[in-house]
Amino acid sequence: MDLSVEAGERRLIIGPNGAGKTTLFNLVTGELRPDGGTVTLFGRDITRVPGWHRAHFGISRTYQIITLFPREDAAAQRHPPRSSGARRSAGIRSPGWSARRR
């Protein structure tokens, strides 16, 4: 598989259960090591760079967690308390990486 994402671009990965979407993300983020091929970021091979270190390059992930706090009710989770100085930020940074499997 070849996949390239230019700086500022977003890509949608869709497919049925078992198609390999999570495996792709695990390979890109360093949770899994590929059997072959490379993961390249800004022209640099990061295939063997540990996942925690890839965060320094701008690659990160979140997990699909339905509940933030298991003991809280649904209303409390939808509107968590914010400190007065807190800023809202959300989004995915896609800094021009490519994954290549040979």
Image (spheres, helix red, strand yellow):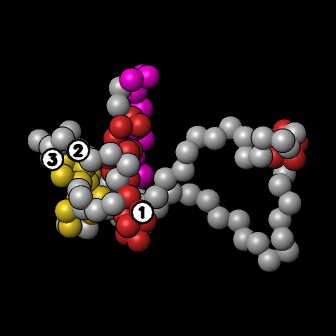
Amino acid identity at mark 3:
Gly
Dividing the picture into quadrants, the one containing residue 50 is: bottom left
Is residue 16 magenta-colored?
yes
Question: What residue do we see at 41% from left, 37% from top?
Answer: 22
Q: Secondary structure at mark 2?
A: loop
Between marks 2 and 3, how big is the CA–CA gap?
7 Å
Which SS type dominates the magenta stretch?
loop
* Closer to viewer: mark 2 or mark 3: 2
Q: Secondary structure at mark 1?
A: helix
Residue under pointer 2: 34
Is residue 96 magenta-colored?
no
Direction from residue 69 to residue 97 in the image, left or right: left
Q: Which mark is residue 52?
A: 1
**Residue 55, position as x, y percentages in the image:** 43, 65
Direction from residue 8 to residue 41 in the image, left or right: left
Question: What residue do we see at 65% from left, 64% from top?
Answer: 89
Could you tell me if residue 52 is visible in this image?
A: yes
Q: Are marks 2 and 3 in contact (CB under 8 Å)?
A: yes
Question: What residue do we see at 19% from left, 62% from top?
Answer: 45
Amino acid identity at mark 1:
Trp
Question: What residue do we see at 42% from left, 63% from top?
Answer: 52
- Position of the N terminus, as image quadrant, is top left
**Residue 61, position as x, y percentages in the image:** 49, 53
Magenta part of the chain: 8-18
Residue under pointer 3: 37
